[in-house]
Image (spheres, rainbow, N blue to C red):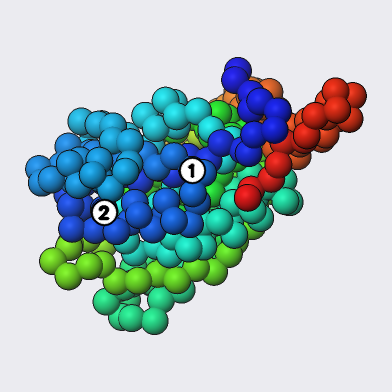
Amino acid sequence: MSRPSLATPPRIAVILPCFNEALAIAHTVQAFRQALPTATVYVYDNASTDETARVARGAGALVRAEPRRGKGNVLRRAFADVEADIYVVADGDGTYDASAAEGMARLLQDECLDMVVGTRVHTENEAYRAGHVAGNWLFNQVVASLFDKGLSDIFSGYRVLSRRFIKSFPCASEGFEIEAEMSIHALQLRMPVREVPTRYAKRMEGSHSKLNTWRDGLRILRHILRLQRLLRPRQFFGATGAVLIVAALLLSIPVFLQFFETGQVLRFPTAILCTGLVLLGALSGLVGLVLEGVSQLSLETKRLSYLAEPALMALEAEDARESVTTGGTARPVLP
């Protein structure tokens, strides 16, 4: 594991996934370079068919390619390849306020956080469509109910992340559901997280959003439910088992009423069905209990991966102690 040397500022990487963003990428790269002069700006060209890579390279970014389409595929590749202490993730379409990045990175470092989310504040209707606003609110409620706590904007693509977060994050997403997966990862490991309101602007003239409200909404919901099944199996399979048992009880009411009246069970198919549903419900609950142990082991593994990386605050304290003993200077915070 590489470590920042003494008397050097924290390494900051700005990661900008891009698909056909030639119109906006130069402005976006320049804005982040101005906000974070010491940062390295990486533009990941996600199989663009326009001049995104050439324009980004001309604006001073390091351009890398990820041929598999999807934001999740891009960030999985970037998180594996890029070495830094602080990671700034945004979109290459110029909708996020790059000037807020310095404050978000400073907040992450000063309070030793693992994630700072730039919650979107928009004043233009074109910036954030009504369907996206409603969908975002709905999914925020779903995540909060499934994982006991939520964020106000789980789909924000503007985040500042610690190295501890990045190197313990087993990214499984392929597309735009990556933001929900990052939010759930932070909630599951109970990481220190803050949200900061940031301006969200409309896209540049001639640039088009890659999001489809219904298609991507269903895809994100499916991914959230999948994560809930994997991360909270007792809750998921327990609820399934409870539904089956309740259905069996409701269906068995006529069978019991007839038995009390006649002393005979005449509805054998219904009785057999009810018995099967009760057995399936009990089996589902048992599966949930078994998988809960597997999920707990997975959580502990991720937690150990998280703890294997030192926090920025710990690095600064170590540098300060070494500077006292060696007569050098401590590693500075963000300039």
Q: Which corner quadrant of the image does residue 226 belong to?
A: top left
- Separation (CA) of disc 1 from disc 2: 16 Å
Q: Is residue 252 above or below residue 46?
A: below
Q: Amino acid at mark 1?
A: Ala
Residue that lies at the very extreme toward the left in this rendered image: 49
Give me the residue at 39% from left, 62% from top: 96
In the image, is residue 320 above or below residue 114? above
Sequence order check: which comes first, mark 1 or mark 2? 2
* Res. 254 mark: none
Kindly identify which residue carries mark 2.
Answer: 26
Tell which of 270 and 65 is nearer to you. 65
**Callout 1: helix, strand or loop?**
loop
Give coordinates of residue 324: x percent, y percent.
89, 30
Looking at this view, is 168 or 324 the one in front? 324
Crowding near the residue tagged with mark 1, few <14, some 14–19, many ≥20 C-alpha atoms within 10 Å: many
Is residue 224 shown to the viewer in this render?
Answer: no
Point 37% across, 29% down: residue: 77
Report whether 244 appears left or right of 48.
right
Determine if residue 324 is in view. Answer: yes
Residue 103 rendering spot, x and y as whole percentages? 59, 59
For the N terminus, the quadrant is top right
Write down the quadrant of residue 261 in the picture.
bottom right
The residue drawn where x is 72% and y is 51% is 110
Left or right: 177 with respect to 36?
A: left
Q: Which residue is mark 1?
A: 39
> Element under label 2?
helix
Left or right, 276 with respect to 242, comes to: left
Residue 239, given in percent of the width and then of the height, sits at 55, 46
Q: Name the residue type under label 2.
A: Ala
* Circles 1 and 2: CB atoms closer than 8 Å: no
Q: Could you tell me residue 275's position as x and y percent?
A: 49, 36
